[in-house]
Image (spheres, rainbow, N blue to C red):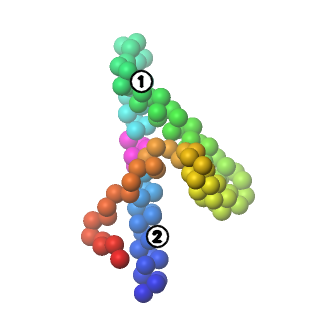
Amino acid sequence: MEKMHIIATIEESAHHFLYCIKTEYVSTREAGQIMEKYIKEGKITPDEEHILKTQFVDTLKLAGVVVPFVLIPGASILMPILIKVAARHNIELLPSAFNQPKPEISGTQPS
């Protein structure tokens, strides 16, 4: 019974991670379209400027998490701990897509 709970937790976490990656991808594409509009027209709305700034910060955060994870031996153990500790001190290390509530997975019931 415990094994089933562990598997369900892993599946839920993997689904959330992939959902957040997809959300970041969509946001990055939107920011690219805004930059393209700015290059063509020379101006953007304040809302578009806010989206662009937020996505730029998210991209820097993602690079700050991914680069050490790839380059530093043992970072796969260190980074999750660092992210949890930072969250306790109200420091956002992850992009904004990862701070949204987890979406419901269709067909599964919480136990």
Quadrant in the rendering for residue 103: bottom left
* Spatial separation of the CA atoms under disc 1 and disc 2: 37 Å
Q: Which residue extends farthest front?
A: 89
- The label shown at residue 49 is 1
Q: Position of residue 95 (x, y in %)?
A: 50, 44
**Looking at the picture, does residue 9 appear above or below residue 91?**
below
**Looking at the picture, does residue 17 appear above or below residue 91?**
below
Is residue 9 visible in the rendered structure shown here?
A: yes
Q: Quadrant of the N terminus?
A: bottom left
Q: Position of residue 21 (x, y in %)?
A: 44, 50
- The magenta-colored residue range is 22-26
Crowdedness near tag 2: few (<14), some (14–19) or many (≥20) residues, C-alpha within 10 Å: few
Q: Which residue is mark 2?
A: 10
Q: Residue at x 45, y 63 (%)?
A: 14
- The label shown at residue 103 is none
Mark 2 falls on what kind of element? Answer: helix
Decide whether residue 71 is among the magenta residues. Answer: no
**Looking at the picture, does residue 76 appear above or below residue 29?**
below
**Relative to 48, is 84 on the left or the right?**
right
Q: Residue at x 58, y 45 (%)?
A: 91
Is residue 83 visible in the rendered structure shown here?
A: no
Q: Residue at x 34, y 72 (%)?
A: 110
Q: Which residue extends farthest left?
A: 107
Q: Position of residue 111 (x, y in %)?
A: 35, 77
Mark 1 falls on what kind of element? Answer: helix
Residue type at the position of mark 1: Glu
Residue type at the position of mark 2: Ile
Q: Position of residue 100 (x, y in %)?
A: 41, 50
Q: Residue at x 66, y 62 (%)?
A: 77
**Looking at the picture, does residue 81 appear above or below residue 24?**
below
Quadrant in the rendering for residue 27: top left
